[in-house]
Amino acid sequence: MTTKPKWAFFEGQIVPFDQAKVSIMTHTLNYGTGAFAGIRAYWNPDEERMYIFRILDHFRRFLSSARFLYAQVDYTPEQLAEITVELVAREDWRQDCYIRPLLYKAEEAIGVRLHNLRDAVAIFTIPFGKYIQDEEGAKVCVSSWRRVNDNAIPARGKLIGSYMNSAAIKTEAMLNGFDEAIVLNEDGHVAEGSAENLFIVRDGALITPPVYSNILEGITRRTLIQLAREEFEIPVVERQIDRSELYVADEAFFCGTGVQIVAIASIDHRPIGGGRIGPLTQKLRDLYFRIVRGYEPRYSHWLTPVPAGARAGARPQ
């Protein structure tokens, strides 16, 4: 069972979580007309400090998603980051946590549209560990569903309504005995997982679908591309991937804020590499977790420390 937050940012201020409520007539609840972000904060037990990973990058993407919705958001990324740091400090989690900002159409209205509706932002946090339990050897299938097309619902935005597509993909996979699924786009090329970006390794190169393959422009994806090139001098290729190429990959893994880095052991019952986490995936994964917990000072610019004992207060709308 998910641990319930004590606090939420709602209607311009931090309030007890139980007071953060919306009507069943709220437009986003009825039509999916909203956006969200997922941000991780990591607990460093040696320093007894929480670090939020790439918070400004997440809020910049959050506000980009708002553009698809004709939404008016009266906060900058820096203001949203400040509110979030205060909220995480108020919760005082002493373990890894997940931060969920929401943009929603707060109007109580019936009628499908995006314009002439009041926009609101809410944020809450919860303790959060693994998204997929077997992070070193997930069993994966190729989904019968296709990824939403950019000209239908843009996958590069984290739009609430579009995650019906992700939910259908994930449920089909799990009910068929898999941990996760890989989804193809409308032209039959590999896009990503149900809610994760995807990399494969072939002949020493790291390969990932390009942003025009109807994928989320992932922040973890961008991070790993940079680390592969700069830290390990691994060539990274962004190109289309055929379904059959998945089966002959030397390694494969998912990445994302929620999933973090999960090695793929098999795809459609075909073992990938040795059927367990590969050496390149392991190197990237080890470095990534050192960075997000504050053990690599040269990447401290990606981290926002949460001060101990910060006090939360009211914020203007």
Image (cartoon, rainbow, N blue to C red):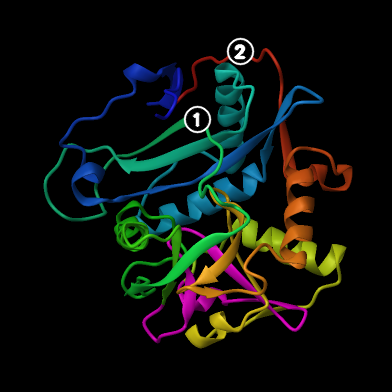
Circle 1 Cα neighbour tier, 10 Å, few/some/many (<14 / 14–19 / ≥20): many
- Residue 131 in view, yes or no: yes
Q: Which residues are the magenta region?
A: 185-214
| Residue that mark 2 sits on | 311
| Residue that mark 1 sits on | 125
Instruction: Return the residue nearer the eye: 69 or 29.
Output: 29
Instruction: Return the residue nearer the eye: 83 or 205.
Output: 205
Circle 2 Cα neighbour tier, 10 Å, few/some/many (<14 / 14–19 / ≥20): few
Q: Is residue 43 magenta?
A: no
Image position, residue 261 (x, y; %): 63, 55
Instruction: Classify residue 281 by image quadrant.
Output: bottom right
Q: Nearer the viewer, mark 1 or mark 2?
A: 1
Where does the C terminus fall, quadrant-wise?
Answer: top left
Image position, residue 166 (x, y; %): 36, 60
- Residue 74 in view, yes or no: no
Depicted 56 relative to depicted 88: above or below: below
Residue shown at the point (27%, 37%) measured from the top left? 106
Instruction: Return the residue nearer the eye: 29 or 283.
Output: 283
Image position, residue 60 (x, y; %): 57, 50
